[in-house]
Image: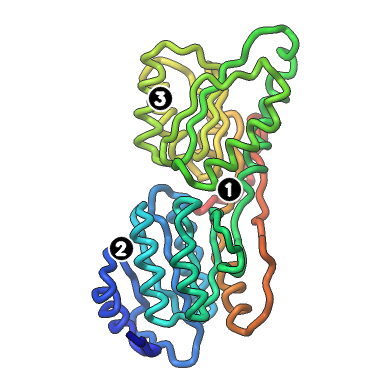
Amino acid sequence: MIFYRLKQPWLFCLVLSVMGGCAKQEHPEGLSSKDGVIVGFSQIGAESAWRTCNTRSVKEAAAQAGVQLLFSNAEQKQENQIKAIRSFIAYQVDVIAFVPIVTGGWDNVLMEAKDAGIPVLVVDRKIDIQDESLYAGHIGTDGVEQGRKAGLFLLEKFKDQLGNGEPIHIVELSGTTGSSMAMSRAEGFREVLSPYSQFQIIYSESGDFLRSKGYELMRSILETGLDIDVLFSHNDSMTLGVLNAMKEAGLKPGVDVVIVTVDAEQAAINALIRGEVNCVIECNPKQGPEIIRLAQALVRGEKIPRLIHMEETVFYEGEDLSSLPPRGY
């Protein structure tokens, strides 16, 4: 079957029905492709304020640049993302960008995009494929470095206790199993702390980056009576659930348990200011302008960097954050 360049968004919906796609699709109202750039963007879902901001950043950047964006919400299912990418191929978009929910399972669909002559941008999370020519570049955040920053904070926090022989018990709530970000943050964290035997990870479990699972896991952990000195949470949504569970159990988060979290949502910064969190590591969601810039460069036939990392910072307990602008997520 041959698909020609479709000129109206409603025809894209028809293609989706033929392809059997079931993820939620959004299309610009009253906008035709003409000779402009069309980008197909597959997002993994809306599981957190961070993810919502990430999506908003892409949509706003596309609108400002006059780029038509075909958006698909995969609702946390890889099969939905694969269907969306195939529908983008059928629509003959200029560039495909997607946030991979897990690292593996992309070879076939990306080969289809390559055969169709459509360049692909991997966004936020990384993928593991045999042929790296199947995608043009990756734009996102450095999960390994974020994990390292968490470890370095703990080395400084507990520097006076190192050498006394007392174990420092760590509970880790990791992100979605199989996601590059969960693996990267765990890798960087262990890289920094592994030379110090006092730091002991006594429990590590996936909370899928969800607030509800963070709450449920921490309730379960506390019921076991584990002696916890540190919580390292791979994202703020899980951390916010943890804070609720700790408070219900009569604990003072940030005091009874040192808490390190990643993302830097406004709610986490507020918790840091209240003393309920000790360290917040930024994961910058505002990747939209860079994604659209790279997409436009690819359409012009330009070569782009294989890897671009967003600029990020770390927020520590005791800092004066009164002048910090609102996070926007």
Which residue position holds label 2? 23
- Residue at position x 66%, y 41% in the image: 314
Q: Nearer the viewer, mark 2 or mark 1?
A: 2
Three-letter amino acid code at disc 3? Met
Q: Position of residue 307 (x, y in %)?
A: 66, 61
- Depth-wise, is mark 2 or mark 3 nearer the camera? 2
Label 2 sits on a secondary structure element that is: loop
Q: Quote the CA–CA distance across marks 3 and 1.
A: 23 Å
Q: Which residue is mark 1?
A: 283
Residue 324 visible somewhere in the drawing = yes
Q: Residue at x 34, y 60 (%)?
A: 80
Q: Earlier in the sequence, mark 3 or mark 1?
A: 3
Circle 2 Cα neighbour tier, 10 Å, few/some/many (<14 / 14–19 / ≥20): many
> What SS does tag 1 mark?
loop
Q: Earlier in the sequence, mark 2 or mark 3?
A: 2
How far separated are the C-alphas under marks 2 and 3? Answer: 32 Å
> For this view, does 7 lie left or right of residue 115?
left
Between discs 2 and 1, the one toward the N terminus: 2
Residue identified by numbered label 3: 218
